[in-house]
Image (cartoon, grey):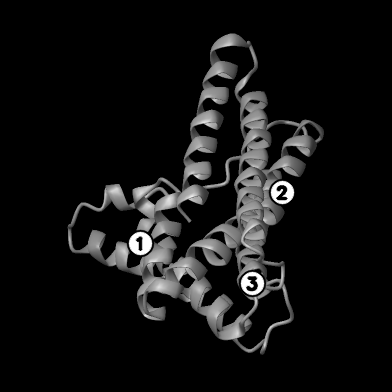
């Protein structure tokens, strides 16, 4: 797990350096720079997923050991999806309640939004949409679930109680997104995904849940832009 996080941090530093270099050394417009950033991010997430696989295989693990097998039961899947949206909705309602009470919650607003530049024509958006779609719906669910559930949760559950391992791995998942506004809801989401992994015995359950949530968010964003 230590080497896995080392690879994650190193990749983040390299990605940040690459994006700064692109911004300083090129005359790309904002949309082109965003597209390059997403491409680099795809390779970063694929990179730290590869680190997980490399570390696992060196220790004699297999894809089945990491959870890539048929679930013992599929029943946690709908519960995960409903619970995930329920927690996000509940958090949103809590924020609105705090605002209604006159409490400043500006630092809790502004989640990780999918940004797509609007334009007069749909054609220039096709490539960015394909890149964003690949990053959000395929790369992120596979890479993040493999890392946080297949590596982090499994490692922590071997030394701590399942409950503590679920909580800590969920918190690390929330912190991974580097946005204080989503730390609480994404921590809850990470805990739910770890629970789903544990009770189903398969990493496909949290991957499908993650894919569903991201796909819906992406679709809603695209419809909003194209309309």
Mark seen at residue 203: 3
User: Where is mark 2, residue-wise?
Assistant: 133
Is label 2 or label 3 in front? 3
169 or 187: nearer the viewer:
169
Q: Quick one: SS at disc 3? A: loop
Is label 3 or label 1 in front? 3
Residue 19 lies, in percent from the top left, at 56, 25
**Which one is earlier in the sequence, the residue at label 2 or at label 1?**
2
Residue 37 figure quarter: top right
Residue 72 figure quarter: bottom right
Residue 218 lies, in percent from the top left, at 65, 54
Residue 40 lies, in percent from the top left, at 64, 34
Q: How many callouts does the rendering have? A: 3
Determine whether 128 is above or below 213 in the image. Answer: above
Can residue 112 be seen from the camera position used here?
Answer: no
Q: Residues within 10 Å of mark 2 (few under 14, many from 20)?
A: some
Q: Quick one: SS at disc 2? A: helix
Mark seen at residue 11: none
Tell me whether the residue at label 3 lies in contact with that at label 1, contact meaning CB atoms closer than 8 angstroms: no
Residue 56 figure quarter: bottom right
What residue sits 67% from the left and 59% below the top?
57
Residue reaching furthest right? 123
Residue reaching furthest left? 102
């Amino acid at each position: 797990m230590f080497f896995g996080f080392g690879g994650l941090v190193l990749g983040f530093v390299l990605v940040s350096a690459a994006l700064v270099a692109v911004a300083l050394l090129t005359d790309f417009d904002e949309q082109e720079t965003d597209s390059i950033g997403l491409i680099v991010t795809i390779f970063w997430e694929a990179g730290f997923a590869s680190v997980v696989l490399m570390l696992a295989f060196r220790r004699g693990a297999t894809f089945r050991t990491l959870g890539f097998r048929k679930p013992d039961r599929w029943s946690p899947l709908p519960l995960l999806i409903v619970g995930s949206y329920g927690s996000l909705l509940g958090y949103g309602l809590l924020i609105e309640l705090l605002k209604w009470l006159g409490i400043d919650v500006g630092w809790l607003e502004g989640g990780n939004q999918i940004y797509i530049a609007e334009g007069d024509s749909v054609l220039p958006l096709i490539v960015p949409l394909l890149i964003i779609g690949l990053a959000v719906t395929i790369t992120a669910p596979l890479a993040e679930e493999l890392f946080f559930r297949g590596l982090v949760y499994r490692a922590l559950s071997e030394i701590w109680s399942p409950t503590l391992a679920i909580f800590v791995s969920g918190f690390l998942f929330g912190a991974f997104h580097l946005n204080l506004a989503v730390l609480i809801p994404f921590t809850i989401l990470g805990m739910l995904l770890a629970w789903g992994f544990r009770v189903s015995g398969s990493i496909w359950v949290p991957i499908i849940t993650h894919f569903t949530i991201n796909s819906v968010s992406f679709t809603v964003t695209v419809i909003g832009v194209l309309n």
